[in-house]
Image: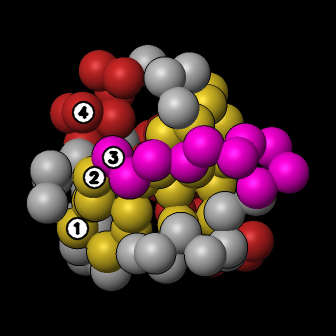
Amino acid sequence: MKVYIFRCGTTLLWCVTEDSRGANLPYEKCTDWKYFGRIEVDPNGILHDDLDGIIAEIEENGFWIGGGSKNQFSEWAEKN
């Protein structure tokens, strides 16, 4: 599973989705979503607790939105 990270401008508001184009991002929350990176999720691997919760919300709602530090997402993201 691949998930894609988007950042709201230069804020600390993030959205993570399976849609690489970000077509399902909540534009009512932010009109300036910018692609940040992607995460390759191994379904058999052990996830960080925070990432596990994010994946569960994506599976339920199509995306996850929330706050977080740039360092946290940089650690997880592949920049391509």
Q: Amino acid at mark 2?
A: Gly
Mark 3 highlights which residue? 36
Mark 4 highlights which residue? 74
Q: Secondary structure at mark 3?
A: strand
Which residue appears at 27% of the width and 52% of the height?
A: 37
Asked whether 40 or 70 is in front, the reply is 70
Mark 1 highlights which residue? 40
Label 2 and label 1: CA atoms lie apart by 10 Å
Residue 20 at x, y percent in the picture: 40, 75
Residue 14 visible within the image: no
Q: Amino acid at mark 1?
A: Glu
Which residue appears at 45% of the width and 47% of the height?
A: 34
Residues at circles 4 and 2 in contact by the CB criterion of under 8 Å: yes
- Neighbour tally class for label 4: few under 14, some 14-19, many 20 plus, Cα within 10 Å: some
Question: Residue lying farthest right?
Answer: 28
From which residue to which does the magenta span run? Answer: 27-36
Q: Earlier in the sequence, mark 4 or mark 3?
A: 3
Which residue appears at 15% of the width and 50% of the height?
A: 79
Residues at circles 3 and 2 in contact by the CB criterion of under 8 Å: yes
- Name the side, left or right, on which 13 lies relative to 18: right
Q: Earlier in the sequence, mark 4 or mark 2?
A: 2
Label 1 and label 3: CA atoms lie apart by 14 Å
Most common SS among magenta residues:
loop
Label 4 and label 1: CA atoms lie apart by 13 Å
Q: Is residue 54 above or below residue 24?
A: above
Mark 2 highlights which residue? 37
Q: Secondary structure at mark 4?
A: helix
Q: Is residue 57 above or below residue 23?
A: above
- Name the side, left or right, on which 26 lies relative to 54: right
Label 4 and label 3: CA atoms lie apart by 8 Å
Residue 49's image quarter?
Answer: top left
